[in-house]
Image (cartoon, rainbow, N blue to C red):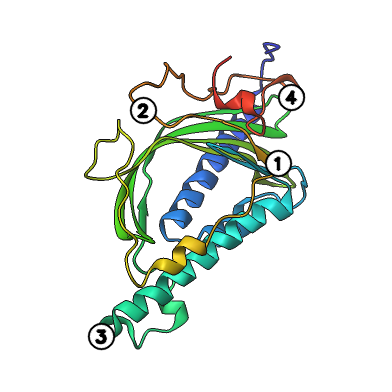
Amino acid sequence: MSGQIFSTEELVGRWEDQRDCKNILGRYINAVMLNRDLAAFDCFWSKEREDISLGLNDGFYRGQAAVKAFYDRLFERDRLVGQLLQEQLPDELAEKSEQDLYGTGEMRFLPSSSCVIEVAEDAQTAKGIWTLLGSSDRVMPEGPASYWTWGYYCVDFIREGVDWKIWHMMYLWDINHLSGQNWAKPERPLPVLEGFEALADCKFPEMTEQVCMREPYHAMRRFTRTPRVPEPYRTFSETFSYGEKEGACYV
């Protein structure tokens, strides 16, 4: 970093930028917890940049079309879950509309902490990392199930006019494991439950780039550092990107 000295007005602006980025991720997480992933994409992701990316443990979705397709499939899957539950629980859900059914049967709890945010000196981009220690109740082909979900959100933000938007995001997990089983060992498979078989065919789109970003925890995993924590920087060309694998771990 250049050691630039900011005026009081500039420091207030930078604090506001940091607060806005923190709030965007908080609102995004709250939308995800309410199964409003598609709305979160529409509200919080950049629509001006074609080079947006979503990184998961096993690769990237890159570009507007690919990232949107991922969120579309989440929406379709949640809608299918509601339909299947209505068929299985007619006494409780028969009178529910498709809108009322949406999100039924699934709950994701994703409290975030250990936040580190750095705003670039040129105030055009920012970077943030959050740790997650949560749980989720999902409906799978095997029926309802609960999972431990421990991991990270890593985000590059970009300024668009007066607003901040998500540019690159990584959602990486160390643990995404069925509750009630030893998460240091492979999951013991459960049988597919009659009435929920259709979920097995609701697969996510093929990734733009398949690459091992982060190996989920297992007893023989080598020591793995956290994803890279943002450091002060002047402009985005002088720092790493959460849109590339190098952002997934310390180098």
* Residue type of the residue flagged with mark 3: Asp
Disc 3 designates what residue?
A: 91
Nearer to the camera, 109 or 175: 175
Q: Give the mark nearer the N terminus: 1 vs 4.
A: 1
Q: What SS does tag 2 mark? A: loop
Q: Which residue is mark 4?
A: 235
Of helix, strand and loop, which one carries label 4?
loop
- Numbered disc in front, either 2 or 4: 2
* Front: mark 2 or 3: 2
**Residue type (three-letter) at the residue carrying disc 1:** Arg
- The first of marks 2 and 1 along the sequence is 1
Going by the image, does 102 lie left or right of 15? Answer: left
Q: Earlier in the sequence, mark 4 or mark 3?
A: 3
Say which residue label 2 marks.
Answer: 218
Image point (37%, 21%), residue name: 220
**What is the CA distance from the residue labelled 2 to the residue labelled 4?**
38 Å
Mark 4 closeness class: few <14, some 14–19, many ≥20 residues within 10 Å: some
